[in-house]
Image: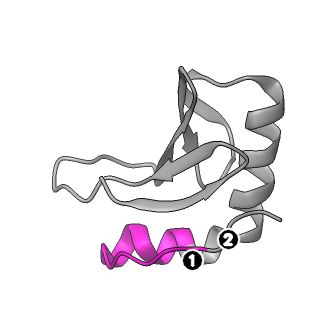
Amino acid sequence: MPVISRFYGIIIKMYFKQSEHNPPHIHAIYGEYTGVMNIKTREIMDGDLPARAEKLLAEWVELHEKELLTIWETQNFVTIPPLN
């Protein structure tokens, strides 16, 4: 699972497997926490992240939604700048 971005201790990844399912989503790792966030709705679909990490992740996804959806659809890996 390639790393798409890293910021504030959050590592963001996306699977590139035929078996990966809709809706489009990313996987986030923050210390001992993991979460799966829907790219379009920015809701946590699975796992658990601390509130602050979830808020930062949602902000980043909102800024990069178009790029994330392009990666999901094309499975063409690119890195995306971190949240500053």
**Residue drawn at (77%, 63%) of the image:** 83
- Position in image of residue 77 (x %, y %): 36, 75
**In the figure, 2 relative to 10: above or below?**
below
Image mark count: 2
Magenta segment: 68-80
Residue 77 magenta-drawn? yes
Quadrant occupied by the C terminus: bottom right
Most foreground residue, 37 or 80: 80
The answer to whether residue 12 is left or right of residue 22 is right
Dot 1: what SS? helix
> In this figure, which residue is indicated by the disc labeled 1?
67
Most foreground residue, 22 or 28: 28
Q: Dot 2, crowdedness within 10 Å: few (<14), some or many (≥20)?
A: some
Q: Quadrant of residue 62?
A: bottom right
**Residue drawn at (68%, 48%) of the image:** 41
> In this figure, which residue is indicated by the disc labeled 2?
64
Q: Dot 1, crowdedness within 10 Å: few (<14), some or many (≥20)?
A: some
The amino acid marked with disc number 1 is Glu
- Position in image of residue 35 (x %, y %): 54, 31
